[in-house]
Amino acid sequence: MTEVLSAPHSMEFPYTRSTGPMVGAFLTGLRDRRVLGVRDSAGRVVVPPPEYDAGTAAVLPADELIEVASEGVVTSWSWNPKPRLGQPFEQPFAWVLVQLDGADTGLLHALDAPRDAIRTGMRVRIRWAEEPVGFIKDIACFEPAP
C-alpha cells in the first residue's frame, strides 16, 4: 500500500496596495458622505474617478475632483433572485447602474426595492452606511428617491 504524504498549506497574498490619489480621494469623499468624479478629456464627469483618461491615457488631475449629487437615475438594472454569500442583501435585490446628477457615467451598486417597483429611468438616492469609514460599502445601497 502507498502512503499518502500531506502537509498544511495556506494560500495568501501578503501585500498591500495603495489606493492612489484618485481612488483614495473618492473613498475619503464617501467617508464624508460626498461622491466625487473627475472631468475627462471629452468633458464628461466620470464617477468613480479613474486615474487615467480613457481616451488619451493621460493622467487625470486629482486636484480637480468634482462633487456630484447623491441622487440620480437608473440607466440599467438586473434582478438578483438568489443572492450569494457576501452580497449586499440576503433577500432578492437588483444591481443597478446609476447616473448620479452631475455625472455623465454610471455607478454600479445594489438597489433595495421590490422588483415590480424598479424601472429604467427611476430616481434613486444613496442610502449611506450608519458609520462611513472610507470604503465602497459606505454606500450601503441605493433606494427609491421620494
Image (tube, grey):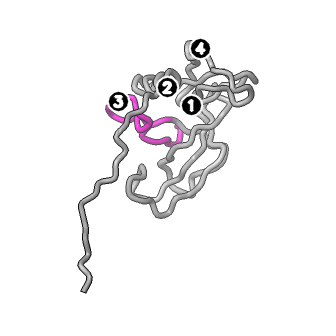
Tag 2 residue: 26
User: Which sits in the foreground, 76 or 22?
Assistant: 22
Answer with left or right where residue 26 lies relative to residue 13: right
Quadrant placement of the N terminus: bottom left
Mark 3 and 1 residues: CB-CB less than 8 Å, in contact?
no
Report crowding for label 4: few under 14, some 14 to 19, many 20 or more residues within 10 A (C-alpha). few
Direction front: furthest residue: 2
Tag 3 residue: 133
* Residue located at (73% from left, 25% from top): 56
User: Which sits in the foreground, 83 or 113?
Assistant: 83
State how far apart marks 2 and 1 are (Cα).
7 Å
Direction bottom: furthest residue: 1
Inspect the magenta stretch and tell me whether residue 63 lies in it: no
State how far apart marks 4 and 1 are (Cα).
13 Å
Mark 2 and 1 residues: CB-CB less than 8 Å, in contact?
yes
User: Which sits in the foreground, 106 or 3?
Assistant: 3
Secondary structure under tag 3 reads loop
Instruction: Return the disc, 2 or 3, that comes first in the chain's sequence.
Output: 2
User: Which sits in the foreground, 95 or 120?
Assistant: 95
Inspect the magenta stretch and tell me whether residue 130 lies in it: yes
Instruction: Return the disc, 4 or 1, that comes first in the chain's sequence.
Output: 1
Look at label 3 and name its amino acid: Val
State how far apart marks 3 and 4 are (Cα).
23 Å
Residue range in magenta is 126-146
* Residue located at (37% from left, 37% from top): 15
State how far apart marks 2 and 3 are (Cα).
12 Å
User: Residue 57 lies in what quarter of the image?
Assistant: top right
Mark 4 and 2 residues: CB-CB less than 8 Å, in contact?
no
Residue 82: image location, x then y, percent: 46, 63
Instruction: Return the disc, 3 or 4, that comes first in the chain's sequence.
Output: 4
